[in-house]
Amino acid sequence: MSSSNQKKVMCQKCGTWCGSGRKYCPDCRKTYKEDNGRRNLEKLKDITKADCVYKHGEMSNKYAYIRWHAKNKFKNVFTECKICGYDKHVELCHIKSIKSFPDDALLEDMNSEKNIVPLCPNCHWEFDHGILKLKN
């Protein structure tokens, strides 16, 4: 398909041409990524399934979006369980639960390196059920 036959898409934020299959132009995408961490729970409460579609399906609510954001932020940072050292599969665990944050809490605070710990599935389950205590 030649470039003249491609569907021209306008940026949803600024209205400039942004290319086929894109919602935002390169400048607005960069701004969106930078502003993403400064969102708070109040702003995330209106997230709809259509806003949250990503490569593995749909996210049902703001909590799923927060977890997804954490996974993307730390996908290459944490590679083994902090407790037992297991490195085949680790999950990101919020030390302070997402639900315990006030509505004006920022996404970057909820998903800060101080509030995220990599745990294997077993250690994660034990932490969530109060069996395992994390040392600072």
Image: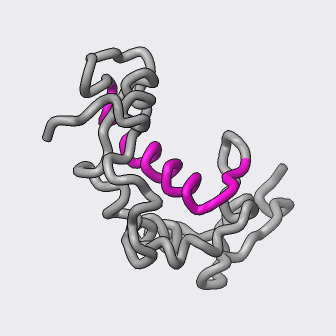
Front-lying residue, 90 or 51: 90
Q: Is residue 68 magenta?
A: yes
Q: Does residue 27 appear to the left or right of 2 in the view shown?
A: left
x, y (%) of residue 10? Answer: 71, 76
x, y (%) of residue 109? Answer: 31, 63
Q: Does residue 5 appear to the left or right of 24 in the view shown?
A: right
In the picture shown, does residue 54 fall above or below 12? above
Look at the image and tell me in which quarter the C terminus lies.
Answer: top left
Which quadrant of the structure image shows residue 106?
Answer: bottom left
Residue lying at 37% horizontally and 72% vertically, measured from the top left: 105
Which quadrant of the structure image shows residue 129?
Answer: top left
Q: Does residue 74 appear to the left or right of 43 in the view shown?
A: left
Residue lying at 84% horizontally and 49% vertically, measured from the top left: 1
Q: Which residues are magenta?
A: 58-79
In the picture shown, does residue 23 fall above or below 124? below
Q: Is residue 100 magenta?
A: no
Front-lying residue, 99 or 55: 99
x, y (%) of residue 91? Answer: 43, 32
Front-lying residue, 26 or 35: 35
Q: Is residue 38 visible?
A: no
Residue lying at 42% horizontally and 37% vertically, measured from the top left: 128
In the picture shown, does residue 111 fall above or below 15? above
x, y (%) of residue 98? Answer: 44, 57
